[in-house]
Protein backbone atom coordinates (compact mmCIF):
# COMPACT_ATOMS: atom_id res chain seq x y z
CA UNK A 1 0.00 0.00 0.00
CA UNK A 2 1.43 3.36 -1.05
CA UNK A 3 0.39 6.60 0.64
CA UNK A 4 0.97 10.05 -0.81
CA UNK A 5 2.45 12.72 1.43
CA UNK A 6 -0.94 14.25 2.18
CA UNK A 7 -2.60 10.86 2.77
CA UNK A 8 0.17 10.00 5.19
CA UNK A 9 -0.26 13.38 6.90
CA UNK A 10 -4.01 12.90 7.31
CA UNK A 11 -3.46 9.44 8.80
CA UNK A 12 -1.13 10.95 11.41
CA UNK A 13 -3.61 13.74 12.10
CA UNK A 14 -6.42 11.25 12.71
CA UNK A 15 -4.16 9.31 15.06
CA UNK A 16 -3.27 12.52 16.91
CA UNK A 17 -6.95 13.36 17.35
CA UNK A 18 -7.68 9.83 18.59
CA UNK A 19 -4.99 10.33 21.25
CA UNK A 20 -6.46 13.70 22.23
CA UNK A 21 -9.78 11.96 22.91
CA UNK A 22 -8.04 9.15 24.80
CA UNK A 23 -6.11 11.70 26.89
CA UNK A 24 -9.35 12.65 28.63
CA UNK A 25 -9.12 9.34 30.51
CA UNK A 26 -5.40 8.58 30.20
CA UNK A 27 -3.11 11.64 30.33
CA UNK A 28 -0.20 9.62 28.95
CA UNK A 29 -1.90 9.71 25.56
CA UNK A 30 -0.90 13.38 25.20
CA UNK A 31 2.68 12.47 24.32
CA UNK A 32 1.48 10.30 21.43
CA UNK A 33 -0.90 13.06 20.36
CA UNK A 34 2.09 15.43 20.16
CA UNK A 35 4.27 12.97 18.23
CA UNK A 36 1.53 12.43 15.67
CA UNK A 37 0.59 16.08 15.22
CA UNK A 38 4.27 16.99 14.76
CA UNK A 39 4.54 14.27 12.12
CA UNK A 40 1.47 15.80 10.46
CA UNK A 41 3.09 19.25 10.43
CA UNK A 42 6.26 17.84 8.89
CA UNK A 43 4.38 16.04 6.12
CA UNK A 44 2.09 18.98 5.34
CA UNK A 45 5.09 21.31 5.00
CA UNK A 46 6.79 18.76 2.71
CA UNK A 47 3.56 18.48 0.73
CA UNK A 48 3.58 22.23 0.19
CA UNK A 49 7.24 22.01 -0.84
CA UNK A 50 6.41 19.18 -3.24
CA UNK A 51 3.73 21.38 -4.82
CA UNK A 52 6.45 23.95 -5.52
CA UNK A 53 8.66 21.32 -7.15
CA UNK A 54 8.74 17.52 -6.55
CA UNK A 55 12.53 17.42 -6.17
CA UNK A 56 12.54 19.91 -3.29
CA UNK A 57 11.39 17.31 -0.76
CA UNK A 58 14.59 15.31 -1.17
CA UNK A 59 17.68 16.00 0.93
CA UNK A 60 19.87 15.31 -2.11
CA UNK A 61 17.99 16.13 -5.30
CA UNK A 62 20.50 14.14 -7.35
CA UNK A 63 19.95 11.02 -5.25
CA UNK A 64 16.32 11.07 -4.06
CA UNK A 65 16.46 8.56 -1.23
CA UNK A 66 15.83 10.54 1.95
CA UNK A 67 13.45 13.46 2.42
CA UNK A 68 14.52 16.70 4.07
CA UNK A 69 14.13 17.41 7.77
CA UNK A 70 11.35 19.65 9.02
CA UNK A 71 13.80 22.51 9.57
CA UNK A 72 15.31 22.22 6.10
CA UNK A 73 11.85 21.96 4.51
CA UNK A 74 10.88 25.18 6.25
CA UNK A 75 14.04 26.95 5.02
CA UNK A 76 13.45 25.80 1.45
CA UNK A 77 9.87 27.02 1.50
CA UNK A 78 11.02 30.48 2.50
CA UNK A 79 13.69 30.49 -0.21
CA UNK A 80 11.09 29.89 -2.89
CA UNK A 81 8.92 32.72 -1.60
CA UNK A 82 6.42 30.98 0.70
CA UNK A 83 6.08 33.37 3.62
CA UNK A 84 6.32 31.88 7.11
CA UNK A 85 5.66 34.62 9.64
CA UNK A 86 7.24 34.85 13.09
CA UNK A 87 4.30 33.26 14.88
CA UNK A 88 4.34 30.29 12.50
CA UNK A 89 8.09 29.87 12.92
CA UNK A 90 7.61 29.85 16.69
CA UNK A 91 4.99 27.12 16.31
CA UNK A 92 7.32 25.01 14.18
CA UNK A 93 10.20 25.47 16.63
CA UNK A 94 7.82 24.39 19.37
CA UNK A 95 6.93 21.31 17.33
CA UNK A 96 10.58 20.34 16.89
CA UNK A 97 11.29 21.01 20.56
CA UNK A 98 8.39 18.89 21.81
CA UNK A 99 9.18 16.01 19.51
CA UNK A 100 12.81 15.98 20.62
CA UNK A 101 11.98 16.22 24.31
CA UNK A 102 8.88 14.02 24.54
CA UNK A 103 10.49 11.70 27.11
CA UNK A 104 10.67 14.52 29.67
CA UNK A 105 6.90 14.70 30.18
CA UNK A 106 6.83 13.36 33.72
CA UNK A 107 4.93 15.79 35.93
CA UNK A 108 1.52 17.43 36.10
CA UNK A 109 3.09 20.78 35.25
CA UNK A 110 4.66 19.39 32.12
CA UNK A 111 1.29 17.89 31.22
CA UNK A 112 -0.26 21.37 31.26
CA UNK A 113 2.61 22.60 29.12
CA UNK A 114 2.26 19.87 26.53
CA UNK A 115 -1.48 20.52 26.25
CA UNK A 116 -0.86 24.22 25.62
CA UNK A 117 1.82 23.53 23.03
CA UNK A 118 -0.34 20.95 21.28
CA UNK A 119 -2.89 23.72 20.76
CA UNK A 120 -0.21 26.04 19.35
CA UNK A 121 1.02 23.40 16.91
CA UNK A 122 -2.50 22.42 15.87
CA UNK A 123 -3.45 26.06 15.35
CA UNK A 124 -0.48 26.54 13.02
CA UNK A 125 -1.42 23.40 11.11
CA UNK A 126 -5.02 24.53 10.69
CA UNK A 127 -4.20 28.06 9.51
CA UNK A 128 -1.24 27.03 7.30
CA UNK A 129 -3.31 24.41 5.47
CA UNK A 130 -6.15 26.84 4.81
CA UNK A 131 -3.78 29.55 3.60
CA UNK A 132 -1.63 27.38 1.34
CA UNK A 133 -4.22 24.95 -0.05
CA UNK A 134 -7.39 27.03 0.09
CA UNK A 135 -9.52 24.60 2.07
CA UNK A 136 -10.22 23.56 5.64
CA UNK A 137 -8.11 20.73 6.95
CA UNK A 138 -11.17 19.39 8.79
CA UNK A 139 -12.91 18.83 5.44
CA UNK A 140 -10.78 15.68 5.11
CA UNK A 141 -11.90 14.26 8.47
CA UNK A 142 -14.85 12.04 9.34
CA UNK A 143 -17.51 13.20 11.79
CA UNK A 144 -15.81 11.99 14.97
CA UNK A 145 -12.37 13.36 14.11
CA UNK A 146 -13.86 16.60 12.81
CA UNK A 147 -15.71 17.02 16.13
CA UNK A 148 -12.49 16.62 18.13
CA UNK A 149 -10.70 19.09 15.81
CA UNK A 150 -13.55 21.59 16.18
CA UNK A 151 -13.15 21.42 19.95
CA UNK A 152 -9.45 22.17 19.65
CA UNK A 153 -10.13 25.10 17.33
CA UNK A 154 -12.62 26.48 19.84
CA UNK A 155 -10.00 26.10 22.59
CA UNK A 156 -7.29 28.08 20.85
CA UNK A 157 -9.74 30.82 19.98
CA UNK A 158 -10.35 31.53 23.65
CA UNK A 159 -6.98 30.98 25.30
CA UNK A 160 -5.77 34.60 25.47
CA UNK A 161 -5.63 36.25 28.89
CA UNK A 162 -3.95 39.35 30.34
CA UNK A 163 -1.25 38.73 32.96
CA UNK A 164 0.88 41.47 34.51
CA UNK A 165 -0.46 43.82 31.84
CA UNK A 166 0.55 41.54 28.95
CA UNK A 167 -1.63 39.35 26.71
CA UNK A 168 -0.62 35.69 26.68
CA UNK A 169 -2.05 32.23 26.34
CA UNK A 170 -4.31 31.15 29.17
CA UNK A 171 -2.05 28.35 30.41
CA UNK A 172 1.15 30.39 30.26
CA UNK A 173 0.99 32.55 33.44
CA UNK A 174 1.12 29.47 35.70
CA UNK A 175 4.06 28.09 33.73
CA UNK A 176 5.93 31.39 33.82
CA UNK A 177 5.43 31.69 37.58
CA UNK A 178 6.52 28.10 38.14
CA UNK A 179 9.68 28.79 36.13
CA UNK A 180 10.71 31.41 38.71
CA UNK A 181 11.14 28.60 41.26
CA UNK A 182 13.63 26.73 39.06
CA UNK A 183 16.76 28.68 39.98
CA UNK A 184 19.34 26.13 38.84
CA UNK A 185 19.83 23.35 36.30
CA UNK A 186 21.87 20.20 36.91
CA UNK A 187 24.32 18.53 34.57
CA UNK A 188 26.60 15.64 35.61
CA UNK A 189 26.01 16.40 39.28
CA UNK A 190 26.90 20.08 38.92
CA UNK A 191 24.35 22.86 39.50
CA UNK A 192 24.35 25.84 37.14
CA UNK A 193 22.53 29.06 37.98
CA UNK A 194 19.97 29.96 35.30
CA UNK A 195 20.43 33.23 33.40
CA UNK A 196 17.68 35.80 33.83
CA UNK A 197 16.21 37.95 31.09
CA UNK A 198 18.48 40.98 30.76
CA UNK A 199 21.55 39.26 32.26
CA UNK A 200 22.71 37.67 29.00
CA UNK A 201 25.80 39.87 28.73
CA UNK A 202 27.04 38.45 32.02
CA UNK A 203 26.71 34.83 30.91
CA UNK A 204 30.19 34.36 29.47
CA UNK A 205 32.49 35.20 26.59
CA UNK A 206 30.17 33.55 24.04
CA UNK A 207 27.10 35.57 25.09
CA UNK A 208 25.07 37.29 22.40
CA UNK A 209 24.91 41.05 23.18
CA UNK A 210 21.55 42.80 23.14
CA UNK A 211 21.26 46.58 22.84
CA UNK A 212 19.01 47.50 24.49
CA UNK A 213 17.48 44.63 26.46
CA UNK A 214 13.74 44.42 25.67
CA UNK A 215 11.48 45.04 28.67
CA UNK A 216 9.94 41.63 28.09
CA UNK A 217 11.28 38.55 26.34
CA UNK A 218 9.91 38.26 22.80
CA UNK A 219 9.21 34.54 23.25
CA UNK A 220 8.13 33.83 26.84
CA UNK A 221 7.14 37.34 28.09
CA UNK A 222 9.57 37.21 31.03
CA UNK A 223 10.30 40.69 32.38
CA UNK A 224 13.84 42.00 32.88
CA UNK A 225 15.15 40.22 35.97
CA UNK A 226 12.76 37.27 35.61
CA UNK A 227 13.73 33.75 34.70
CA UNK A 228 12.57 32.60 31.30
CA UNK A 229 9.59 30.31 30.82
CA UNK A 230 10.04 26.62 29.89
CA UNK A 231 11.15 26.05 26.30
CA UNK A 232 11.93 29.74 25.69
CA UNK A 233 14.13 30.25 22.63
CA UNK A 234 15.85 33.30 24.18
CA UNK A 235 17.20 31.71 27.35
CA UNK A 236 20.98 31.28 27.32
CA UNK A 237 22.69 28.12 28.54
CA UNK A 238 24.50 28.74 31.87
CA UNK A 239 27.21 26.28 30.86
CA UNK A 240 28.08 27.05 27.22
CA UNK A 241 26.29 30.41 26.77
CA UNK A 242 24.52 29.14 23.66
CA UNK A 243 20.80 28.93 23.14
CA UNK A 244 19.53 26.67 25.94
CA UNK A 245 16.78 25.27 23.73
CA UNK A 246 19.18 23.89 21.12
CA UNK A 247 22.64 23.54 22.70
CA UNK A 248 24.28 20.17 23.33
CA UNK A 249 24.30 20.51 27.12
CA UNK A 250 21.86 17.82 28.24
CA UNK A 251 20.57 19.20 31.55
CA UNK A 252 18.36 17.05 33.74
CA UNK A 253 14.68 18.00 33.59
CA UNK A 254 13.76 19.85 36.83
CA UNK A 255 11.46 17.78 39.03
CA UNK A 256 9.08 20.69 39.61
CA UNK A 257 9.07 21.98 36.04
Image (cartoon, helix red, strand yellow):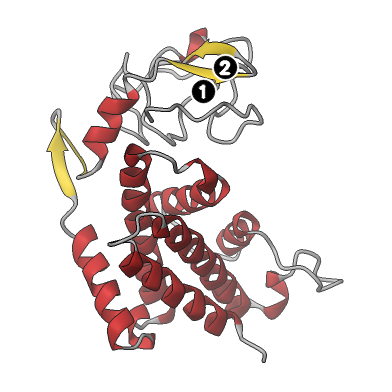
Query: Which residue is at the front of the view, 88 or 257?
Result: 257
Residue located at (37% from left, 82% from top):
134
Residue in front for this viewpoint, 215 or 114 = 114
Q: Secondary structure at mark 1?
A: loop
Q: Residue at x 43, y 48 (%)?
A: 90
Is 79 on the left or on the right of 20, as rendered?
Answer: right
In front: 177, or 157?
A: 177
Crowd class of label 2 (few under 14; some 14 to 19; many from 20; radius 10 Å): some
The answer to the question of whether label 2 and label 1 lie on touching residues, with beta carbons closer than 8 A, is yes
Q: Which image quadrant: the C terminus? A: top left
Residue 236, which numbered label? 1
Marker disc for residue 207: 2
| 248 up-or-down from 104: above or below | above
- Residue 145, percent across and down? 33, 80
Where residue 124 sits, quadrant-wise, is bottom left
**Of labels 2 and 1, the one closer to you:** 1
- Rendered position, 25 above or below 187: below
Amino acid sequence: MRLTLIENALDSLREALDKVALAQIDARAWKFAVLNVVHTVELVIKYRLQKEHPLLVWADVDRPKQTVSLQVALERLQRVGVTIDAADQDAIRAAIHWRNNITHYETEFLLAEVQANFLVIFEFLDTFYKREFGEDLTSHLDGNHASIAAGLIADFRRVDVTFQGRPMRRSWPAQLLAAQRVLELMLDGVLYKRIRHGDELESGDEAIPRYPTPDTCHDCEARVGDLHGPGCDSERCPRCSGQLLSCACNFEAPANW
